[in-house]
Image (cartoon, coloured by chain):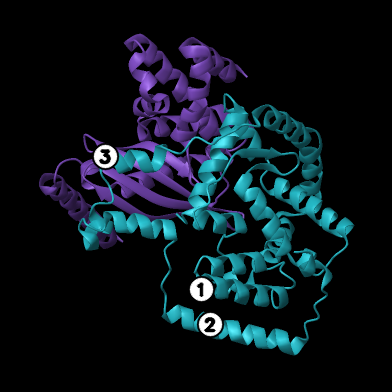
Amino acid sequence: MHLLMTKKKRFSPVSIALLFFFFSVIHAWARVDDTVVPSPVAQAEEISVAGASASDAEEDDWIDEDSWDDDWEDGEVIADPLEPLNRLFFHFNDKLYYWVLKPVARVYSGVFPEELQIAVRNFFDNLRAPARAVNCLLQGRVRNSSQEVVRFALNSTVGIIGFGDFARDILGLDSSNEDTGQTLGYYGAGGGFYINWPFLGPSNFRDSIGKVGDAYLHPFIFLDVDWEVTAGAWVLEQVNYTALTLGDYELFTETALDPYAAVKDAYQQYRKGLIENK
Amino acid sequence: MIRNIMLQHKNGVVIILLTMVCHIFGAGSAASAKGPMDQLQVAVDEIMAILQSDELMGTEQKEKRKQMVLNVVVDMFDFREMARSSLGPSWNDLTAEEQDKFVGLFTSLIEERYIGKIDSYNNQKIIYKKERVKGSMAIIYTAIVDKELEIPIDYKLKEDQGKWLIHDLKIENVSLIANYRREFDGILRKEQFAGLVKKIEEQLEN
């Protein structure tokens, strides 16, 4: 993986244009052949129920007393061998939020209007497009992948280095929320145990590894940007995000009896939903 | 002028007649004729009308606004069923009295969480995507567009005497009931029902 970091790549404008053209063609092709490859896990499940009425299974038998309950309410219990440490870090992050992040975000949102905050969010979101494109491809979603490439190319240029979402607003190209952790989940990797990282918040073993993968697919890393800049950008992103979602964290944790447990479960459910692309 | 009034009057009579005909021939009550999504939409529109009405603007009206929203919300949810499933099998170990008490506490907890959220509503667009109905069960897929981001909200409903009541909702795939159940489970195991009641009461006081 260090090879990736040390090898300086120089992209000429011509090669970028060619690459863009190539992906546009794939995108157009994928639009015609609009098939999403089901995950290996889903395929296995499909085989096991294939005996039943296959064609109308989807529309008519989707709901019965059991699935209506199970689908919604029975999640797996997530292992938490590090609970004492996790709780300590949860407490730390909680204090960090109230004492540092929230006051800073309030000042920030007083100074910068919401439109600008959304633009900043778009900018950081755009930087994750390469990771999304690669992970869509790894999950067999060719169309979504090419869409991400087109989005990245357009929003980085016409969208003014990502501050605007030209591709979505004008062309209706939506982003797909994929990351390396989800790709690992798609291939059947379970979440593993729960980890509540200091600063980074809730995660699990699989998604922590996924984060490393995502980092290597981030332009800041493969363009070898100074780590101070990267860290500064990360802080700005957190402040900006907090400014846009002020009050959400408080409402959720203050109406929970055990905020740590509530966040842990919400994380698990949220990631499960993303992996299953519901 | 007079003709105009006459015409308007005539139109009015026709409308009244039509309404009567609809009432006579319409199957059952209005509620049962409507699908779950329509019912949800009517209730949500009602809430939005309260939040956007000029008379109820401002912080000094907050309590009044809250109460009016609450009146609508109470009719949308099946709180007893929600409380029961949030406890899981432990529900059956409770006496009828304890069950009633728990339903009350649980209802307040949900109200606190969601009324707080609803009150911060600021003209966000709500999208009704689709509904899936089978017999007396339904799932409705919606989304709210907040600061240019689409946040999916799914409702799980069951029909009860012609009225569709919400049994659970998922925000960004996180089920409210499942989330509370996981929390309650942990507390029940360590501190039993009395401990859970105490915790909820403390929480509501803050």
The x and y percentages for residue A230 are 83, 58
Q: Amino acid at mark 2?
A: Ile
Q: Which residue is mark 1?
A: A142
The x and y percentages for residue B90 are 39, 19
- Find out whether the residues at labels 3 and 2 contact each other: C-beta distance under 8 Å: no
The x and y percentages for residue B136 are 23, 41
Callout 1: residue from which chain? A
Which chain is purple in the rendering? B
Question: Does residue B38 appear left or right of residue A230 in this picture?
Answer: left
For this rendering, which residue is in front, A264 or A147? A264
- Of callouts 3 and 2, which one flags the residue occurring earlier in the amino acid sequence? 2
Q: Amino acid at mark 3?
A: Glu
Q: Do callouts 2 and 1 point to residues on the same chain?
A: yes
Callout 2: residue from which chain? A
Q: Secondary structure at mark 1?
A: helix
How far separated are the C-alphas under marks 3 and 1?
36 Å
The x and y percentages for residue B131 are 33, 52
- Of callouts 2 and 1, which one flags the residue occurring earlier in the amino acid sequence? 2
Give the vertical position of A155 relative to A186 (above or below).
below
Q: Which residue is mark 3?
A: A65
Report the number of discs. Answer: 3
Q: Which residue is mark 2?
A: A26
- Find out whether the residues at labels 2 and 1 contact each other: C-beta distance under 8 Å: yes
Callout 3: residue from which chain? A
Give the vertical position of A247 relative to B204 (above or below).
below
Which chain is cyan in the rendering? A
Q: Nearer the viewer, mark 3 or mark 1?
A: 1
